[in-house]
Image (cartoon, rainbow, N blue to C red):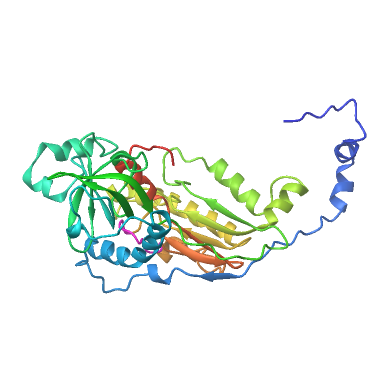
């Protein structure tokens, strides 16, 4: 960080000395030029995450995996044709012994420590052991490939496909041979990959989307000073002209969960007690922060794993009663988790991080 020598001004910082040595009255008489905030066209794209009042809980993950495999099978088939032109593609039921073939299917990871609701009723020791750790990986994990007809066990010889680095549900193609009466030995693998991104014209001026998460205003160690510094910067009330010009280029703020956190004291409090008024202070603080932000720029607030919303994805928007001050602003939007929107011709899709946290539990990679 640079230092300012008050005794020896130089030509490069002479203007800064003039500002420091000017009379307070002179600075007050000069009317600061207003910096207009940049704008972009906003279009919500998350209607599919909104649930109706009549919810169905009879759907299974198998239907989701089957639909995903049908949509991605043709894409993986094209990759197999280009990468392995001389390798025949077959179904699992048609895999012969000692014959090199390619098979397309959905990956399943068999984990001994994965928690199951059945273990709670059967009182197996593995249930408590699984819940006691931060991850569910073990050296006994194995990989299984399944298609619409059958499933087969796999043993991979390539580093790209190992039990500790993959998760259930991925659609892929494997090339290898089936051992006599044993596993399918994988020698190469191809993933479905990411879809091609459409070519978009670059904007003429810079525009930014601010992503914020983990405010945790209900936490006992919440630092309101840091929160207020964030609010002051985004609203243009912090820093000199360069910082204010940068803040004016923020066209959208997305709060990706964790704004409030768990209200443990409120849950345990007596609803007829005066202590409830004190326990509601984090909710009022959150509303005041959102009101100040919504008065300056568009704000989308998503629920997180510890916020007062439903637990399972997609999480529905936070209730309007939590924001009596911010809700009247048209720039304040309560959105779902996951959240999708189009801004200036660019499509953005994101979550509050539950999917990444779950993947970290089912793999040995700890880097986010």
Which residue lies most toward the right here? 11
Q: Quadrant of residue 49?
A: bottom left
Q: Residue 4: x percent and y percent?
A: 81, 29
**Quadrant housing the N terminus:** top right
The magenta stretch spans residue 313: yes
Residue 140 versus residue 221: which sits nearer the camera? 140
**Residue 1 appears left or right of 11:** left
* Residue 281 relative to residue 242: left or right: left
Closer-to-camera residue (232/242): 242
Front residue of 128/147: it is 147
Residue at horizontal 30 percent and vertical 63 percent from the top: 69
User: Residue visible at 51% across and 40% down?
Assistant: 223
The span shown in magenta is: 310-318
Q: Where is residue 270 shown, x and y percent of the image?
A: 27, 51
Query: In this rendering, does residue 294 appear at all?
Result: yes
Secondary structure character of the magenta stretch overall: loop
Left or right: 158, with 11 as reference point: left
Q: Picture coordinates of residue 210 (x, y %)?
A: 58, 53
Whether residue 228 is situated above or below residue 331 in the rendered picture: above
Q: Quadrant of the C terminus?
A: top left
Residue sitting at 68 percent across and 57 percent down?
249
Q: Residue at x 40, y 53 (%)?
A: 304
Rendering coords of residue 126 (x, y %): 14, 38
Answer above or below: position of 9 versus 310. Answer: above
């Amino acid at each position: 960080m640079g230092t300012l020598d008050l005794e020896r001004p130089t030509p490069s910082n002479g203007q800064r000395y003039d500002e420091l040595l000017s009379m307070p009255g002179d600075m007050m008489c000069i009317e600061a030029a207003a910096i207009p905030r940049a704008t972009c066209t906003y279009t919500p794209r998350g209607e599919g995450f909104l649930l109706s009042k009549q919810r169905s809980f009879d759907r299974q993950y198998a239907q989701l995996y089957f639909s995903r495999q049908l949509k991605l099978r043709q894409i993986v088939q094209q990759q197999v044709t280009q990468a392995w032109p001389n390798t025949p593609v077959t179904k699992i039921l048609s895999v012969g012994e000692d014959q090199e073939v390619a098979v397309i299917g959905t990956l399943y990871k068999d984990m001994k420590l994965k928690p199951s609701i059945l273990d709670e009723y059967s009182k197996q020791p593995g249930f408590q052991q699984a819940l006691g750790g931060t991850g569910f990986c073990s050296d006994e994990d194995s990989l299984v490939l399944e298609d619409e007809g059958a499933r087969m066990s796999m043993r991979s010889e390539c580093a790209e496909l190992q039990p500790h680095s993959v998760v259930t549900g991925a659609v892929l193609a494997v090339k290898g041979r089936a051992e006599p009466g044993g596993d399918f030995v994988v020698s190469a693998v191809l993933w479905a990959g990411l879809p091609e991104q459409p070519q978009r014209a670059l904007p003429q001026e810079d525009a930014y989307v601010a992503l914020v998460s983990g405010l945790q205003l209900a936490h006992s160690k919440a630092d309101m000073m840091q929160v207020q510094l964030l609010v002051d910067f985004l609203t243009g009330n912090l820093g000199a002209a360069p910082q204010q010009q940068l803040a004016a280029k923020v066209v959208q703020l997305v709060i990706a969960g964790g704004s409030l956190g768990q209200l443990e004291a409120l849950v345990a409090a007596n609803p007829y007690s005066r202590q409830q008024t004190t326990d509601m202070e984090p909710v009022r603080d959150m509303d005041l922060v959102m009101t100040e932000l919504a008065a300056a720029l568009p704000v989308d607030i998503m629920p997180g794993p510890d916020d007062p919303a439903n637990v399972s994805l997609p999480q529905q928007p936070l209730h309007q009663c939590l924001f009596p001050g911010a809700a009247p602003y048209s720039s304040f939007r309560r959105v779902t988790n996951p959240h999708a929107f189009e801004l200036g011709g660019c499509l953005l899709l994101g979550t509050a991080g539950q999917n990444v946290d779950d993947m970290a539990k089912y793999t040995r990679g700890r880097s986010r």
